[in-house]
Image (cartoon, grey):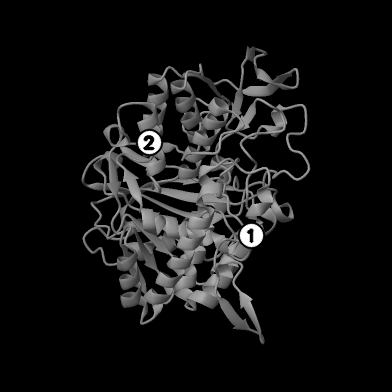
Amino acid sequence: MIGAGMGAMAAAARLAVAGHRVTVYERSATYGGAVGSFEREGFVFDTGPALLHLPAVWRDLFLKTGREPLEKCVGLVQVDPASRHLFADGAEVSLPNASRAGIVSALEAALGAGAGERWGEFLGRARDAWDRSRRPLLEEPLWSDWRMLERDPYPAPRQRRLLRSRQASTVAEIGAWELADPRLAALLEGCALGYGLDPRHAPASAALLPYMEQTFGSWYVEGGLRELARAVYERCLARRVEFVFGAEVTAVVERDGRAAGVELADGTAVDADHVVAGADAAGLVGRELWKDGDIRPRQEAGGEPLPGRFTVLLALRGAGSPTAHRSVVHSPDTGAEAAAVFGGRVAELPTVTVLRPDDPRTRPDGGHEAVSVSATVAGHGGSVDWHDKALRERYAEVLIDTAERAFAGETAAGGIRERLLWQEILTPAETGRISPPSLAGPGGRHLHPANTTGLPGLYLVGGLAHPGGGLAHAGMSGALVAGLIVEGPGFRGSQ
């Protein structure tokens, strides 16, 4: 196993239970991949994803790999309200967790007559897209005839546009034509941006992302999401998975036309019946991994790196009184924001997410608060150099200025700057790119490579492979890879 990310560990635990001897080689000093944390002076912050969606994926892993269920290994708390949204016109709304009726009512009350009804109708169509694409996109290996997924499953109603009938084919068109309210459009487009998708071009099938969150809920892991990574790691150890940290794999060994092991940076060669790569494997193999017609890794558009996330970790004095765990301060122009993010520029008015966990495990005592603010930004290494100290500090100020809206009215403790002890800045230069989930739609442009490869015995797992990025998707990829190895090419997914 190459890499100790969440998808790789999910596969490792399942394979070990099935009787395989599994060794994980990880070049860094720890496990979890993007699910990291930062600790200083009693403050604890997630540095990757911070909320859990579709916890059933991880419940299934713990059920299938041992007697202790997930809730016995981590504290899992429903976040309610699921999110608070602040719009450019001054309107705001708090959306309840996993309640379509409650969400519709909240939007109707906050944004005016018809807003909730339109969002409810949109969620109904998004549910149809979910039902049509759930198995091939999440629960089954990617079909060899993946072109069946070129058809967008979102049932967009026909609209009269420029003297002819048209259907929304992108997230932005859904917002403009179906939701018909700039605040509802910002709600949808901001969600797409958070997953690393360009709402101007992302297929309408991306509607299933807010549907998934609002239907199955948002969950917080007590102590931070890093605790889930710890629990999965400990489950692997309990099933006798061996981890070797500080061990960089430099090549996949091929013998008799199939993967037969790995070679490490120190020259050590390790034999294996199967090799599972939780990282980009193309550079580790001395041959082309994909045939004509296969889905290949996502390419950078226009020469610019794929987007990442800019995050500021804030250690605050004083006990805050947050009205929501997650607040989103929406950009007044998501289209302009997306153009900057995907065009290699710094967005002047970004959509900013503020996370304020009311969790004593994340702060030194009740007189302090650990807060993070983040935005999706252009990737590192193209037109934007996130190593630039002046740029980092300037953009941190932009995010803090925007995030102050989420603190308005807290007279007891005050805003961010009055309470700030210190801050830590993380950019795509440190945390890498965002890997979006797989989506059906024209051209298969939003699909990820299959878990099997053109080299027999070599498998791909995690955010760079089917079914794409996201914590739930990583767990699904681990289940798919384990099924393919244990049951062989006839494996068709969970039943």
Residue 151 tag number: 1
Residue sitting at x 45%, y 38%: 35
Residue at 24% from the left image edge and 51% from the top image edge: 318
Residue of label 2: 228
Tell me if residue 30 can be seen. Answer: no
Q: Amino acid at mark 2?
A: Leu
Question: Is disc 1 surrounded by few (<14), some (14 to 19) or many (20+) residues within 10 Å?
Answer: few
| Residue 465, horizontal then vertical, whole percent | 60, 40
310 over 479 or under it: above or below = below
> In the picture, residue 109 is in which quadrant?
bottom left
Mark 2 residue crowding within 10 angstroms, few (<14) / some (14–19) / many (20+) = many
Among numbered discs 2 and 1, the one appearing first in the sequence: 1
- Of the residues shown, which amino acid type is indicated by label 1? Arg
Secondary structure beneath label 1: loop
Q: Is residue 393 left or right of residue 388?
A: left
User: Does dot 2 land on a helix, a strand or a loop?
Assistant: helix
* In the depicted structure, whether residue 108 falls above or below residue 33: below
Q: Position of residue 86 (x, y in %)?
A: 39, 68
* Residue 407, quarter of picture: bottom left
Give left or right: position of 147 versus 116: right
Contact check, label 2 and label 1, Cβ < 8 Å:
no
The residue nearer to you, when weighing 5 against 387, is 5
Identified at 60% across, 52% down, the residue is 307
Between 227 and 136, the residue placed more toward the observer is 136
The circle on residue 135 is none
* Residue 393 visible in the shown view: yes
Separation of disc 2 and disc 1 at Cα? 36 Å
Quadrant position of residue 154: bottom right
Residue 336 in percent (x, y) is at: 59, 68
Q: Residue 198: percent from the left, percent from the top?
A: 60, 60
Mark 2 against mark 1, which lies toward the viewer? Answer: 1
